[in-house]
Image (tube, rainbow, N blue to C red):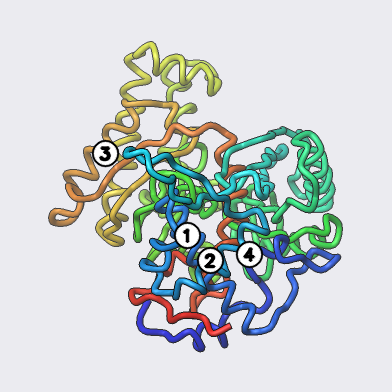
Amino acid sequence: MGQKTLSDREVRARPAREPAAAAHGAASDGTPLRRGSRELLRDLNSSLLIEMVRESRPISRAQLARQSGLSAPTVSTIVGRLIERGILVEVAIAPANGGRPPVLLDINSTGGYVVGIKLRGDGLTTVVCDLDAHVVATSESSVSLVNDPAAALQAISTATRDALRRAGVPRSKVLGVGIGLSGVIDSEAGVCRFSHLLRWRDVELVKPLRRSLRLPVWIDHDMNCLAIAEKWAGDALAYRDFVTLSVGRGIGLGIVIDRSPYRGATGSSGELGHMIVEPGGPACECGRFGCLEALVGEDAIRRRVGERHGREITRDELIELAGQEDEVTIEVLEAAGRKLGLAVANMLTLLNPEALIICGEGTDLGAPYLDPVVTAVREQTFADQGRQVAVKIQSWGDEAWAVGAATLVLRESFSLPAPDDAGSAIWHRPETPLPPVRA
Ligand SMILES: [Zn+2]
C-alpha cells in the first residue's frame, strides 16, 4: 500500500465509519461516535494487533511488539484495553519442559456478537455469530420483499431482535448488523441503488435501520460478503488477491484485490453472469439477451434438462438426476460447465488472482458441472496462470450468505482504514511496521 504515513491515514481515515463502534460506544441512534485523532491512532494500532492475534493465535505480547514494530509499553496498553473490552483474552499454555506457562493472547470469541442477514426475494436468513464467525443462532423469515422495501425494513428489524433474543445475546455485546443482497449496492451511502431481483431502485437501508435498531448497520453486495467471509474466517485468510465465484441461479464474483473487496465505481463489479456470451441468446432477468447466467445458471440447466425429458423438473429432481448419473442431465451439466469454465478462465486471465474459491448452491450439481470448470481454468487460462491459481470448492449451505453478511460487521469493526478506501482495512497491512504511538 505504498509508504503512506500515519498522519496521511489519520487525515483521510473514515470519520463516519469508525471501527468497533459498539465496543467503543455508539450514539443512541446507532451512528458510530466521532472521536479525536489520538484515539483514532490507537484504533489503528488496535486493529493491527487484533489482526495479528487472529493470524497467529495464541501469541505473546512480546511477539506482537516484534511483529508490529510497536513498543512493548504501547502493546501492553492497547492489549490491556482490548482485554478490558472483552475482545482479547489471556490463555496459559503449559510448556513442554514444565516451567511457568507463558501468558498468550487469543481472540475472546464470546466477547462480542454480530448479526448477519441475507435478503432474498421471498424472505431473509438471519444469523448471530460470535467474533470467530461461528453461528450461535439462525432463523428464516418468509416474506415477499419484491417491490416492497418497507416490508424489508420491518422484517430486518424484527428478525434482528428475535435472533438476538433467541441467542441470549445482550445488546451491549452486539457490534452491529451486516446485510447482504444482490444488486448495485452503494455500501458507503448505505443504499441499494438497483436490484433486479428485488425490483428496488435507490432504497435507503442503513439510515432507517440504524434509527430503528439503534445499532451500527452495514450493507454490501452478497458476493462481496462471501469474499469477506472467506478472508475473515475461511480459506482466504492468507491471500492478497483472490476471487470467489458463486454459482447457482445467479453467477457472480467477489473480487478481492490487495486484501480489499473491489466494488467498482458504482458498486456493480463482479457481474460475471451478466457478461453477454451469445448475442441474441436467451432472455436474461437483467433484461438483456445471451448473458452467461441465462445460458448456464441453475434455472437454465433445469429448463434444458426438463425440455429433454419432456416435463418440468424441480431443483431437487435436478440434483437427484445428477446424483443418479442420468445421461441427459450429465450431458447438459457438462456442456454448461464447459461454457462457464471458459468465462471463468477468461476472467482469471484478466485478473490473475492467487486463488479461485467456487461456492454457492450450484456446487450441489457436483462434478459434472464443476470438473469442466476446473479443467478450463487449468487449460484455457493465459500462460501458466491456470496451473498456478489455487482452486477450492466450498459446499456452503444457505446460511453461508448470512454468515458472510455477519463478517462484514467483523471486518468493519476490526479493520484498519486504508488511505484510499473509507471502509477499508487492515487487509492493507503496511509493508513497513507502523511507528509507535505516542499517546
Ligand atoms: Zn443478464
The residue identified by callout 3 is 374
Residue 184: quarter of image: bottom right
What x and y, as percent, mark residue 362?
45, 33
The amino acid beneath tag 1 is Glu
The answer to whether one can see residue 346 in this image is yes
- Can you name the residue that lies furthest to the top here? 324
The residue identified by callout 1 is 51
**Do the numbered discs 2 and 3 sit on residues whose CB atoms are within 8 Å?**
no
Residue 399: quarter of image: top right
Element class at badge 4: helix
383 vs 423, left or right, is left
246 vs 213, left or right, is left
Disc assigned to residue 81? 4
Q: Nearer the viewer, residue 285 or 399?
A: 399
Disc assigned to residue 47? 2
Local packing at callout 3 (Cα closer than 10 Å; few below 14, some 14-19, many 20+) is many
Q: Specify the quadrant that holds the C terminus.
A: bottom right
Q: Residue drawn at (19%, 50%), measured in percent from left and top?
A: 388
